Amino acid sequence: MLSSLRYMNVPAARFATATEALVRSGGGSYHAKRAMSISALSGFEGKHFISIDRLSNEELRGLLDLSKKYRDVYGRGSSVDPSTAPKPLMGKTVSMIFQKRSTRTRVSTETGTNLLGGHALFLGPSDIQLGVNESMRDTASVLSRFNSIILARVFAHNDITELAKYATVPVINALSDMHHPLQTLADLMALEDHFGDLRGKTLAWVGDGNNVLHDLMLGGAKLGMNIRIATPKGYEENAGVLATTKKLAAENGTSDVFRTTVASEAVKGSDVVVTDTWVSMGQEAEYEKRVKEFSGYQVNASLMKQANPGAVFLHCLPRHPEEVSDDVFYSDQSLVFPEAENRMWTVMAVMAAQLGKL
């Protein structure tokens, strides 16, 4: 299994042109800069990974560069023999709590932990009931005695913060109703692979003002991106996250966040167009209502024409046809599959940094 992983990102090759150009032109200086940025993670050991705004700019840069390093070592084209590749998580275990199912989160974490020499243990709803049969505090205390890291994909963000409060090992937020920081790392990595430096690029969000948007707007602002958001009335992003993003935009010299309820207005002049599911898990009863209220928000060829030439499209998956048309989703503009693959490289980086195994 390990040897086959070296070739898993063949379809992503055409999207890595910016990074490859950096390597060719910068040579050793590129890798020296990357090593320096990764060294900024030396103080990340033992920290929780809850949301992007809790990272310093240096930590965000370090995690992205460590993710790229792991792809170089364990991914397609690596000259490293998988059987002798570094195993920094040897002897370490990760408990993965899943209140909400997910293909990418489970597969990326289990596979990535294995690549680094560790062991990941899946705990689904039938295995563990957070705060039901056992309190959150007790769950955190017990798992901390067994495992090196607790990763949790939950409904309520309060569950993550309570786990982090009582756990004596690092906690990873693999998704809550407020934040999805692992997805943002994967998104920003895909964009850097394609564009190189993201400073001055414009990111347009079209859809629900949800957890995925929250961390993406925070991370984009930290990297110097301009943020433009279109949501239907009543589906706006969290006001506190918006205020934090505005503050980060000012600190990092980008334009103020642009807000509208008209999709084409947000997309106009953008370099990146992003959307997500309109109906998240647990909202199925609202499907018909939401689809009606999101009328005009489908990302299609007509909408993409409002963006800058060379603009790209992102979606964290799973995708539904009402959110994005096939002619965009499967086009050369779409980075969705490299984006999905990056979920593994980025969670590997977070785990290694939390355990001080750089």
Image (cartoon, rainbow, N blue to C red):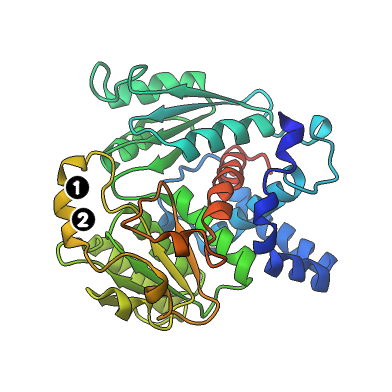
Callout 2: SS: helix
Residue indicated by mark 1: 287
Mark 2 → mark 1, Cα distance in angstroms: 6 Å
Q: Nearer the viewer, residue 353 or 94?
A: 94
The location of residue 72, given as percent across then percent down, is 74, 50
Q: Is residue 133 visible?
A: yes
Residue 138 located left or right of residue 200: left
Q: Is residue 222 above or below residue 138?
A: below
Which quarter of the picture shows residue 133?
Answer: top left
Residue at the (53%, 67%) spot, across then down: 333
Circle 2 Cα neighbour tier, 10 Å, few/some/many (<14 / 14–19 / ≥20):
some
- Residue at position x 51%, y 56% in the image: 336
Task: For the residues labelled 2 and 1, say whether their Cβ atoms are less than 8 Å apart.
Answer: yes
Q: Position of residue 237 (x, y in %)?
A: 25, 62
What residue would you read off at disc 2?
Answer: 291
At label 1, which amino acid type do we have? Answer: Tyr
The percent position of residue 231, horizontal first and vertical second, equals: 25, 67
Residue ID at (54%, 28%): 148
Residue at the location (55% across, 38% down)?
Answer: 108
Which of the image's four quarters has the C terminus? top right
- Which amino acid lies under the numbered mark 2 shown in the image of this protein? Val
Image position of 82 with respect to 228: above or below: above
Quadrant position of the N terminus in the picture: top right
Q: Secondary structure at mark 1?
A: helix
Tell me the tag on residue 242.
none
Left or right: where 262 falls relative to 203: left
